[in-house]
Image (cartoon, grey):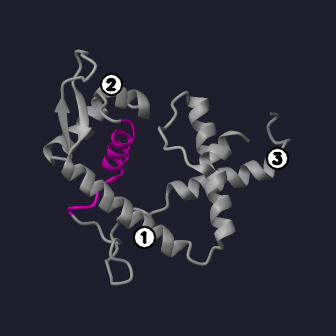
Amino acid sequence: MERGRRGGSVLERLERELMLVARCHVLTPRDRKASADEPCAAPTPDRLDRSAYLLLSRLDAEGAMSIGQLADAFQLDVSTVNRQTGTLLRGGLVERIPDPDGGLARKLRVTALGTERLTAERDCRRTSLARLLEDWTPEDLARFGEVLTRFNREVEAHDGRPWPREETTESAAEGTR
């Protein structure tokens, strides 16, 4: 694609909007006060930070993984993932297990507490998202979900690192387009 030619203004808009999504704190706890309307707004000791949420989500979706596999999945340095998973281990959110396939590297899997905290975090994020999008029509929500899924699949295909997903009717149909 030629620079500045095909869809230049559209690409500029997309780049700007993706930057704005990346800085968005609607779905994550920050220095806001929780209220009856927004119980998940404030950070608490039980809330997961971004790295914990992403690592637990990947382990939940894919099952036990080694630190090396996680580093590859997230395109991070092993030392970074080691530090992040160390926090999860100390918090009792993951545990080390022998490789179920008999390999030498130990694997990490989500504990019952980790599953509980991940479920609570997802509930909070979905509650915040529902509030944010409460005025959207069901059709707009469905279309946004379709386009966002397509975008994420394109990113994953480009990087060669697909995120494991449960196939639903919608995602199966999206994959055939």
Q: Which structural element holds mark 1? A: helix
Q: Amino acid at mark 1?
A: Thr
User: Which mark, by number, is residue 7?
Assistant: 3
- The residue depicted at 67 percent of the width and 52 percent of the height is 147
Q: Which structural element holds mark 3? A: loop
- The residue depicted at 49 percent of the width and 67 percent of the height is 129
Which image quarter holds the N terminus? top right
Q: Amino acid at mark 3?
A: Gly
Dots 2, 3 in contact, CB < 8 A: no
Which image quarter holds the C terminus? top right
Regarding residue 75, the answer to whether it shows in the image is no
159 vs 134: above or below: above
- Depth check, front residue: 68 or 117: 117
Q: Which residue is mark 1?
A: 127
Could you tell whether 167 is left or right of 68 in the image? right
Residue 43 is situated, as x and y percent measured from the top left of the image, at 28, 66
Q: Which residue is mark 2?
A: 68
Regarding residue 64, the answer to whether it shows in the image is yes
Q: Earlier in the sequence, mark 2 or mark 3?
A: 3
Residue 152 is situated, as x and y percent measured from the top left of the image, at 58, 43
- The residue depicted at 50 percent of the width and 71 percent of the height is 130
